[in-house]
Image (tube, grey):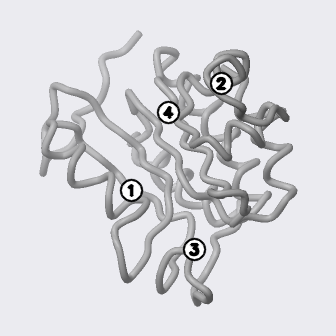
Amino acid sequence: MAPPPILSLALPSETGRVLSIQSHTVQGYVGNKSAVFPLQLLGYDVDPINSVQFSNHTGYPSFKGQVLNGQQLWDLVEGLAANDLLFYTHLLTGYIGSVSFLKTVLEVVEKLRSINPGLIYVCDPVMGDEGKLYVPMELVSVYREKVVPVASMLTPNQFEVEQLTGLRYGGLSTGTTSL
């Protein structure tokens, strides 16, 4: 196997290289705004791709902005590939706003693992909280059936665990069963 390319001229990292595919909000600190800087402080070289660009997070009564689709994500990945920039040690995903985008994330996982079989995929399946979905219902089955099997690690909240497992949390014994 060939040695990995220079990770970044601007931010060399012995720790690793992360592709972070998450939301971006103008107001507030969620998604890439809350992930990139802390990871950089820990020594990681982080390349963010914004899955959406919203005025604020979707927990507010209203929001405005754009949702990237799968083709737009793939275009960015192809641009990185054309310059031999797809060697990542980690993939981190968070809020995804469309089914086509999430399905393309699965293609990205496959492509990144073909370059680095040791890729660690950390998936935060951001779908909702406190009994309320903030994503289209169609995303839940894609997470459950396609994403969970390929992720190295999941970081769901209680509501998201319930969505992924179909089990209602009723205390420690149910929570252990869900996991």
Q: Nearer the viewer, residue 46 or 27?
A: 27
The amino acid marked with disc number 3 is: Gly
- The image position of residue 96, as x and y in percent, is 63, 58
CA separation, marks 1 and 3?
22 Å
Mark 3 or 2, closer to the camera = 2
Residue receiving disc 3: 59
Alpha-carbon span between mark 1 and mark 2: 32 Å
Q: Disc number at residue 175?
A: 2
How far apart, in angstroms, are the residues tagged by discs 3 and 4?
Answer: 23 Å
Measuring 38% from the left and 27% from the top, which residue is drawn there? 89
Instruction: State which quarter of the image contains the C terminus.
Output: top right
**Quick one: 12 or 139, which is closer to the camera?**
139
| Label 3 or label 2, whichever comes before in sequence order | 3
Type of amino acid under label 4: Val
The nearer-to-camera label among 1 and 2 is 2
* Residue that carries the numbered disc 1 in the rendered image: 48
Residue 155: mark in rendering: none
Count of numbered circles in the view:
4
Could you give the CA–CA distance between mark 2 and mark 4, rounded to whole angstroms? 20 Å
Asked if labels 2 and 1 touch by Cβ distance under 8 angstroms, the answer is no
* Residue shown at 87% from the left, 56% from the top: 138
Q: SS of the residue at dot 3?
A: loop
- The reply to whether callout 1 and callout 4 are in contact (CB within 8 Å) is no
Q: Earlier in the sequence, mark 1 or mark 4?
A: 1
**Residue closer to the observer: 64 or 108:** 64
Q: What percent of the width, then of the height, locates residue 120?
A: 47, 24
Residue 109, position as x, y percentages in the image: 61, 34
Q: Which mark is residue 122?
A: 4
**Numbered disc 1: secondary structure:** strand
Q: Tag 3 or tag 1, which sits nearer the N-term?
A: 1
